[in-house]
């Protein structure tokens, strides 16, 4: 690590509460949470840590958010100025770090919730698309702005296209039009849109919903869905799905889940919270 990177103040913050909920927060509101190579490096480090804890069952969910009125304006202007002098290999190294960030967030072994309060431009749209659930304020705006400055949403394109679908991706990647929150929800980029004052409560309610599920089943289901998406109908996939459900049924949490259902009680992993769904009434 360079001396320059050591001397910089942190650009994001990771906090893990006693429920096992990790909050990863961008902390650059003065520049609308724009990111550069340093922030990407910090995010990658934090996601590696969260991934290790999630594999051990110590982290149950991740909330990705940011301070200030913008979620993220995309690439930092100073970083973009430095890029002008980069050669191909320098750009390739930078792009691979961004790719690692998107892949790491997309494949994190616990559920992820993205809290979007405002402008979400360029690569930040990729961050949202890599999260399992996106909850947005009515003030949120999304834009694949790269073509306006002679670039392309290349690294984030697999994730955003998966969320929008190929047809809508063609439109918004080629026009750089701004999507309001309602449009993002209609197209599948956001899952729920709420009033600005209700955003934190909506995120917390979603976290409560996730914490009521089996940690082991959540990890297995997330990995399974990624596998099914790659090869939805093959002998190997069908066999894999049968093995997953069989392993879960005989596992500790599967046995506890079935027992709690028939005994009309909460399973051991579910917190005693009035916000939990009392499905067994």
Image (cartoon, grey):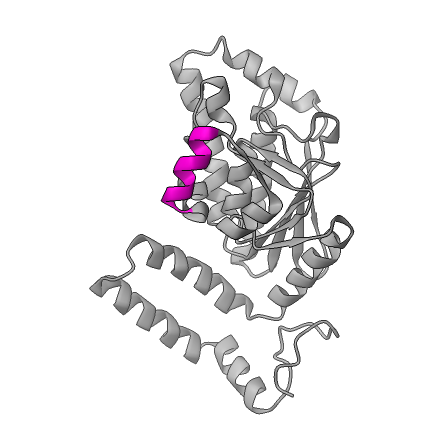
Q: Is residue 59 visible?
A: no
The residue drawn where x is 45% and y is 18% is 150
Q: Give the quadrant of the N terminus.
A: top right
Please give left or right for residue 233 compared with residue 46 in the image: left
List x then y, in percent, for residue 195. Answer: 73, 52
Residue ranking furthest to the bottom: 263
Q: Give the quadrant of the C terminus.
A: bottom right
The residue drawn where x is 78% and y is 51% is 197
Please give left or right for residue 12 compared with residue 145 in the image: right
The residue drawn where x is 42% and y is 58% is 223
List x then y, in percent, for residue 109. Answer: 50, 55
Asked if residue 239 is positioned above or below residue 151 in the image, the reply reads below
List x then y, in percent, for residue 201. Answer: 74, 58
Please give left or right for residue 257 compared with residue 103 in the image: right
Residue ranking furthest to the left: 235
The residue drawn where x is 54% and y is 57% is 110
- Range of magenta residues: 165-175
Residue 238, picture quadrant: bottom left
């Amino acid at each position: 690590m360079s001396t320059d990177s050591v001397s910089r103040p942190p650009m994001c913050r990771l906090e893990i509460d006693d429920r096992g909920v990790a909050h990863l927060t961008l902390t650059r509101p003065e520049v609308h949470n724009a990111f550069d190579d340093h922030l990407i490096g910090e995010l990658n480090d934090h996601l590696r840590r969260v991934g290790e804890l999630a594999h051990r069952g110590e982290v149950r969910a991740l909330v990705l958010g940011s301070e200030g009125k913008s979620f993220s304006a995309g690439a930092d202007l100073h970083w973009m100025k430095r890029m002008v002098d980069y050669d191909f290999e320098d750009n390739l190294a930078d792009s691979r770090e961004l790719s690692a960030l998107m892949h790491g967030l997309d494949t994190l072994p616990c559920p992820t919730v993205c809290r979007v309060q405002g402008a979400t431009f360029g690569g930040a749209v990729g961050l949202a698309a890599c999260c399992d659930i996106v909850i947005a304020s009515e003030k949120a705006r999304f834009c694949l702005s790269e073509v306006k400055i002679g670039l392309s949403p290349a690294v984030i394109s697999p994730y955003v296209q998966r969320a929008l679908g190929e047809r809508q991706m063609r439109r918004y990647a080629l026009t750089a039009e701004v999507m309001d929150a309602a449009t993002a929800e209609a197209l599948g980029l956001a899952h729920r849109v709420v009033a600005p004052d209700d955003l934190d409560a909506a995120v917390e309610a979603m976290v409560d919903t996730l914490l009521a599920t089996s940690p082991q089943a959540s990890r297995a289901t997330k990995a399974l869905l990624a596998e099914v998406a790659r090869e939805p109908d093959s002998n190997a996939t069908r066999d894999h799905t049968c093995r997953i459900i069989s392993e879960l049924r005989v596992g500790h949490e599967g046995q506890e889940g079935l027992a709690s259902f028939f005994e009309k009680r909460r399973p051991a992993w579910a917190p005693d919270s009035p916000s939990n769904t009392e499905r067994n009434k």
